[in-house]
Image (spheres, helix red, strand yellow):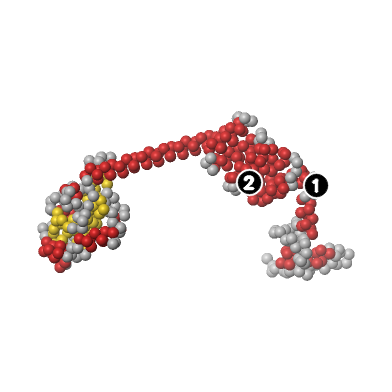
Amino acid sequence: MGEFQKPKRYVPGPGEPALPPQLAQLSDKSVDEVMEELNRSPFFMTQIDESDGKGGENMELEALKALAYDGEPDEVATNFKNQGNGQFKIKLFKNAVEYYDKGLAVKCDVSSINAALYLNRAACNLELKNYRRCINDCKESLKLDPTNIKAYFRMAKAFFTLEKFDEAKQALDFSFKFDAENKSSLTLLEQIINRENTITKIAKKKEEQRLHNEKLANNLISAISIRDYKIIKTSNPAEMLEDAKLELEDAEDIESQLVFPAMILYPTTDEFDFIASVSELSTPLDIMNIVLQRPEEWFKDQKHINFTSKKLDAYMETETGGLVKIGKKASLHKALSTPQPRIPLFDSSIRLYLVPRVEAESWLANWDKELAVKKRYDL
């Protein structure tokens, strides 16, 4: 291939024609300047340019605009309708709506033309998901032509998308008076009925689940009431209790065991453990055996040297802020159901203090009942 040669300017030879005046004007201009000039010509426009490049109007463009409205109103409206149809075919729905708007603005007296403009604009609005506008356009079209099957169909489809099924079926019912075998309408009616049935089934299932959950919740309330357990809700429950639940071992049976989360506190070392599920028939000894499953190194620490099931005592807090020593082999059920002193569940959980026996006397002497109650409510 040879090197690129820059095009030479046209120079007419003997007997050759000179450049036309328009091209002669462009011959001394850059490519960008030439493209700017071409864009002012309606036949070459890539974007609307309403100027003539000199601060005046683009007369060619204005002439074309005027031409669009040249003719009788029905001819002008039909022209806009046809242009809108062209835009619709290439899926430029917003452009199509603008042409249909212009066609309706002409206000010609031909009902069939106006009905078609409304109907076609409804089709655009359906594609653009402007369902309310689609419905209104269909209504306007039907005022002019009550027999138009497409208007009923598009209205029904818009109502269906909005899940207004009664209105959608009503629109189709009207259409069947004029064409009872229309396949598109029959298919849409089937879709509406199927969707209604699906929604009804989902709603029924949700209601059944709601009633079932309500029954289980009532079972739990009854189980707590029968046992006469007291629950105190504090103003600042521990974070780990947010996902923990007080529940029946068998949610359907109020006589099955209650299971609740447990906060195990070691007040002499300022430590704690959390157990997600503890049965009401469990004992403090059972809980000790769980929480004391630790590495040997843990027990070698001086502060844990007395942390064995034989050297630890269990205490629970009373409703009035006092403390009660709980037998290691006594069930939690027995502790919680004892009428006096009343031992509550705190935030639906067990609160158990494990204290080395050698330190218990000192710890008990420093316990403040009033402060314990205040802490429950941040008083």
**Res. 79 visible in picture:** no
Q: Which residue is mark 2?
A: 124
Looking at the picture, which amino acid does disc 1 mark?
Answer: Gly
Q: Which one is nearer the viewer's eye here, 253 or 153? A: 253
Looking at the picture, which amino acid does disc 2 mark?
Answer: Cys
On screen, residue 270 above or below 345: below
Q: Mark 2 packing: few (<14 Cα in 10 Å), some, or many (20+)?
A: many
Which image quadrant is residue 216 in? top left
Q: Which mark is residue 71?
A: 1
State the CA–CA distance, disc 1 to disc 2: 26 Å
Relative image position of residue 15 (x, y in whole percent):
88, 64
User: What kind of element bears circle 2?
Assistant: helix
The N terminus appears in which quarter of the rendering?
Answer: bottom right
Which image quadrant is residue 31 in? bottom right
Relative image position of residue 43 (x, y in whole percent):
75, 56
Which image quadrant is residue 273 in? bottom left
The C terminus appears in which quarter of the rendering?
Answer: bottom left
Dot 1 and dot 2 residues touching (CB under 8 Å): no
Residue drawn at (46%, 39%), measured in percent from left and top? 199
Relative image position of residue 114 (x, y in whole percent):
71, 42
User: What kind of element bears circle 1?
Assistant: loop
Q: Mark 1 packing: few (<14 Cα in 10 Å), some, or many (20+)?
A: few
Q: Earlier in the sequence, mark 1 or mark 2?
A: 1
